[in-house]
Image: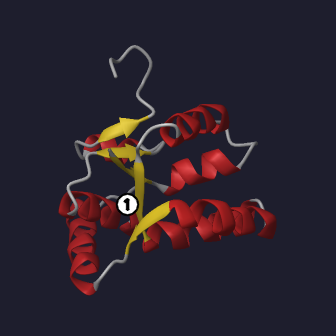
């Protein structure tokens, strides 16, 4: 199974003070025990690096660079994907939606990735299967 990983999941796994840390850590460990391959975009990596550096510091960023990034299959965003995502963002005209989110949606559709490890409602709203699954749902 291929799972897309969003900034919200990376940050929750790495920041012990994040309110979703325990849930994120448990899901990350569960996914690591399966044959899951992890994909993300270089845009998510930039967003995550900036967030880690600003909120946790350089040690958090070093841990991310040394232990997490090597385990990822990175989708490098090209001009066409960027422009499609930019167009989707402008059409949506929502302040609570980011260009990085729209790039993620575009990448997931282009690469036929249905599952996403995240803590954002936007992915479910776009029809993707969000992990961890809410309690009470069948696996």
Q: Where is residue 48 in the image (x, y as percent from the top left)?
A: 57, 64
Q: Would you say 20 lies left or right of 88 here?
A: right
Q: Which of 40 and 88 is in front in this view?
A: 40
Q: Would you say 86 lies left or right of 73 here?
A: left
Q: Where is residue 21 in the image (x, y as percent from the top left)?
A: 66, 38
Q: Which quadrant of the figure has residue 86?
A: bottom left
Q: Would you say 115 lies left or right of 120 here?
A: left
Q: In which quarter of the image is the N terminus?
A: top left
Q: Quadrant of the C terminus?
A: top left
Q: Which of 28 and 6 is in front in this view?
A: 28
Q: Position of residue 102 (x, y in %)?
A: 31, 63
Label 1, residues with CA under 10 Å away: few <14, some 14-19, many ≥20: many
* Residue at the far bottom in the pictured view: 79
User: What residue is shown with label 1?
Assistant: 101
Q: Residue at x 37, y 69 (%)?
A: 99
Q: Which residue is drawn at 20% across and 65% down?
A: 91
101 in relation to 30, above or below: below
91 in relation to 25, above or below: below
Q: Which residue is drawn at 53% across and 35% down?
A: 27
Label 1 SS: helix
61 in relation to 126, above or below: below
Q: Would you say 1 lies left or right of 25 here?
A: left
Q: Where is residue 58 in the image (x, y as percent from the top left)?
A: 78, 70
Q: Which residue is drawn at 53% across and 51% down?
A: 8
């Amino acid at each position: 199974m291929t799972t897309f990983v969003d900034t919200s999941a990376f940050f929750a796994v790495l920041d012990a003070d994040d309110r979703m840390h325990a849930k994120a850590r448990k899901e990350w460990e569960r996914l690591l025990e399966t044959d899951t391959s992890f994909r993300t975009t270089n845009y998510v990596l930039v967003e995550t690096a900036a967030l880690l550096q600003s909120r946790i510091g350089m040690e958090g960023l070093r841990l991310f660079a040394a232990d997490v990034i090597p385990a990822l299959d990175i989708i490098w965003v090209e001009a066409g994907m960027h422009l499609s995502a930019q167009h989707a963002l402008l059409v949506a005209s929502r302040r609570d939606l980011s260009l990085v989110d729209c790039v993620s949606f575009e990448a997931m559709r282009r690469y036929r990735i249905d599952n996403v490890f995240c803590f954002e409602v936007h992915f479910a709203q776009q029809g993707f299967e969000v992990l961890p699954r809410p309690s009470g749902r069948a696996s």
